[in-house]
Image (cartoon, helix red, strand yellow):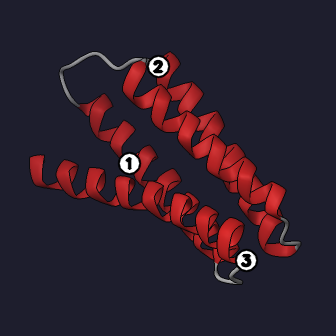
Amino acid sequence: MDIINSVLVFLHLLGMAGIIAGFMLQLIAGHAAGPKSILHSSLLQLVTGLLLTGLAEMGDDPVNHAKIGVKLVVALAVTIVAVVNVRKPDKRLAIAAGTLAIVNVAVAVFV
């Protein structure tokens, strides 16, 4: 189970990096791949986060459900913003997605 958990954490962090990279691509360079990078990375984060939560629930250690709930709501918001950004690209949407991703990291680390 440890290897599965490690792979999921790796993919989860890769998703976070993809959201930030897409945010930077769209904001600084105005590159057309930015919105798609944000969308695919947010979906990766959402799926791996749910799988990590499932693995945590199967373990013996207690799970902080409030933290998981906040992270899930923020992840869903990032995904919704990413979908809208793909349909109608806007730098403000990229800023919102990047900011929400950073907020999600802060919740993961500090709560």
According to the picture, the residue beneath numbered tag 1 turns out to be 51
* Quadrant of the image containing the C terminus: top left
Residue 65 appears at what percent x and percent y? 46, 19
What label sits on residue 22 in the rendered view? Answer: none
Pointer 1 local density, CA inside 10 Å: few below 14, some 14–19, many at least 20: some
Say which of 95 and 15 sits in front: 95
Q: Which residue is drawn at 64% across and 41% down?
A: 100
Q: Which of marks 3 and 2 is in front?
A: 3
Q: Residue farthest to the left?
A: 2
Q: What residue type is labelled 3?
A: Gly
At mark 1, the secondary structure is: helix
Q: Which amino acid does label 1 sit on?
A: Leu
Q: Answer above or below: position of 11 versus 108.
A: below
Sequence-wise, which precedes: disc 1 or disc 3? 3
According to the picture, the residue beneath numbered tag 2 turns out to be 65
Residue 71 appears at what percent x and percent y? 54, 33
Residue 54 appears at what percent x and percent y? 36, 39
Q: Residue at x 63, y 62 (%)?
A: 23
Say which of 32 and 65 sits in front: 32
Q: Residue farthest to the front?
A: 28
Q: Residue farthest to the right?
A: 88
At mark 2, the secondary structure is: helix
Pointer 2 local density, CA inside 10 Å: few below 14, some 14–19, many at least 20: few
At mark 3, the secondary structure is: loop
Pointer 3 local density, CA inside 10 Å: few below 14, some 14–19, many at least 20: some
What label sits on residue 30 in the rendered view? Answer: 3
Measured in 3D between alpha carbons, the distance from the residue under mark 1 to the one under mark 3, in whole angstroms, is 33 Å
